[in-house]
Image (cartoon, helix red, strand yellow):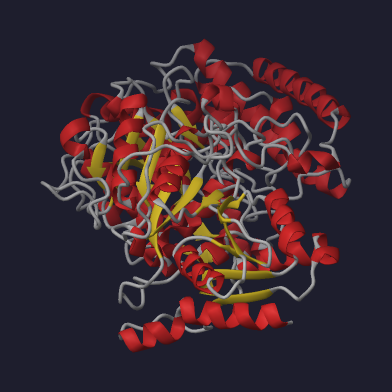
Amino acid sequence: MLAKVKVPKVHDLKKTNKKTLKEWYRLMVLGRMIDERAPNYLKQALGWSYHAPYAGHDAIQLAIGQVFDKKTDHLFPYYRDMMTALSAGCTPTELILNGLSKADDLASGGRHMSNHFAKPEWNIHNVSSCTGNHTLHAVGVARGMQRYKHKGVAISSQGESSTSEGYCYEAINGASNEKLPVVFVFQDNGYGISVPKEDQTANEFAADNFSGFKNLQIIHCDGKDVFDSMNAMLAAREHALKKSEPVIVHAHCVRIGNHSNSDKHEWYRDDKEIAEAKAQDPLPKFKKQMLEAGFTEKELEKIEKKSKEELMEAHKAGVKAAHPTEDSIFDHLYAEAYPGDKYGDGTHDEEGEPIKFITALNETLKAEFRHNEHTYIWGQDMANGEKGGIFNVSKGMQQEFGKERVFNGPIAEDYILGTANGMSRFRDDIRIVVEGAEFADYFWPAMEQYVECSHDYWRSNGAFAPNITIRLASGGYIGGGLYHSQNIEGNLAGLPGVRIVCPSFADDAAGLLRTSMRSQGPTLYLEPKALYNSKDAMAVVPDDFEVPFGKLRVRREGSDLSLITYGNTTHFCLQVAEKLAEEGFDIEVVDLRSLVPLDEEGIKATLAKTHRCLVVHEDKVFGGFGGEITAFINENCFEELDAPVRRVGSTYTPVGFNRILERATLPNADKIEQAVRELLKY
């Protein structure tokens, strides 16, 4: 059994001074007025088209906001946390600007769903609509606090049903394992929209699902009672600070109204249940306690009157405020990239000893760790003895930089990427590299967090960008079969907000990695693992080499046809070009290097020279990234073409384990040569 956290009665009706009680009552009255007014904005077609009323959660949300210290803590409120935001210091005007999705909304400038409150300057974070996923971000921030010996806590708030999500388990498991100062608040109102909690878990209370975790404390409180909630939150924060370990506060609440304005609770709650919920309303209960404390009806009416006046002023300001403009949709899509232009377009003529692709990665990682002491790397199997990653890319790094900066993550891809997002929130100069999975094929459990990374900067209206390089060993030609040989760039390129690069040679591997690690915002860095030790991919690599995003590299000049490619297939294309040169054909080989952003001008330039194009990549032709390249050429270079654009890639099948099956699936030099010859004859 867990040792129970002692919950001192710091606050009760007698111990709490009247000034504090008065302020709490003001906040509760004002918050409820806004909460009850919110649906009217939708009726008047002014906004607030998503509203999740918090009535019944008043006490615990008041406590969360009051205990939160804006100077030291980070707060991750969920979509029902209007009272939390108000109690933490957001003004009524700021709440209404959010509800009406105005340009001056602090949370997102109208980009994110209403009722998702934030105040970036106070580290009140804009969280996703994907309920509970911010638990991982809170854990990541807490890791930053621990690493930098910062005296503060991360507070994550959510409904009890969201704890059914796998990433919530990963967050609490990881926080307990790393002993991180996180307070997880479960606001239990008995329902996940219309789903009763008995359909979520066998335990009556979700917090009890975690009772076996070491280094984790659980506090239950009455989330409808101001004093019980306040004492629980104070004890939880104090424990997290002193012991540097996580605490769950399970607050027993009641949902008085609908889940949201798109829900009708009458469809699944009978009149008796609804009446019982209303009878447990925390606001009239606290008003009664105020009277017991010696306040008069007249004093409370005065507070209520002032609150209404404050609300009306906020209403006027919110309605008058400007809406975001249409052209603003392109703002804050990508955070600022490091120029990477020391070598111009990312080419060089230096002489020296060629090194392997894997050596270039390893040496660049080490160089960047020396360049910026606030750089970290983690993932699965990253550092144990002499081993450094499944392919030894990070070999020797933990020995040089220590376990604080180079360490293993659990086998939990969501956790690996989600905590990277969180830790990068702690300070702007932090740069994080993660092996998002041991193989790119295993990355899918992290997709929710990848999506989160993709729109964090845009969704927060430029307030936050996760500064993360996501390294993934990609592709086939190793006899790996399913989960060890697939390509994923075609699937992921459709999500705006993440740069995607895929080098073919050791020099570009080093240069693109350096640029990725020095940039703001996320980069998906695909490493064709078949090239790690390939002689063909070896190159001379200048010590300070860097490659700008969005600049292709012509690996072989030509005039008869352009082979546009990247990754493993670049080398097959070069083999074909050299072979056909013996027959008098002059083939240009264009290595894209950067898929997002794409070098559109470079593609136009090569087509203006050759007037024929074959797009070659390892991924499947159907649904592959080559379709986007082909569409771009058809829309922008059609007049230059003397033949239709053709594509070579994998068959529309998985990659099999048997080498015969792999050869039948993946592109190779013979398949490319055949397609080139056909296109030259057209």
- On screen, residue 469 versus residue 7, left or right, reads right
- The front one of 63 and 575 is 575
Residue 433: x %, y % from top left: 38, 42
* Residue 615 visible: yes
Q: Please tell me in which quadrant of the rendered image residue 323 appears.
A: top right
Above or below, 505 relative to 312: below
Above or below, 491 relative to 377: below
Q: Residue furthest left?
A: 385
- The front one of 659 and 244 is 659
* Residue 131 visible: no
Total numbered badges shown on the rendered structure: 0
Above or below, 569 relative to 160: below
Q: Residue at 74% of width from left, 67% of height from top?
A: 631
Residue 381: x %, y % from top left: 22, 53
Residue 325: x %, y % from top left: 84, 38
Q: Residue at 25% of width from left, 57% of height from top?
A: 391
Residue 304: x %, y % from top left: 71, 23
- On screen, residue 309 versus residue 416, left or right, reads right
Above or below, 283 relative to 478: above
The C terminus lies in quadrant: bottom right
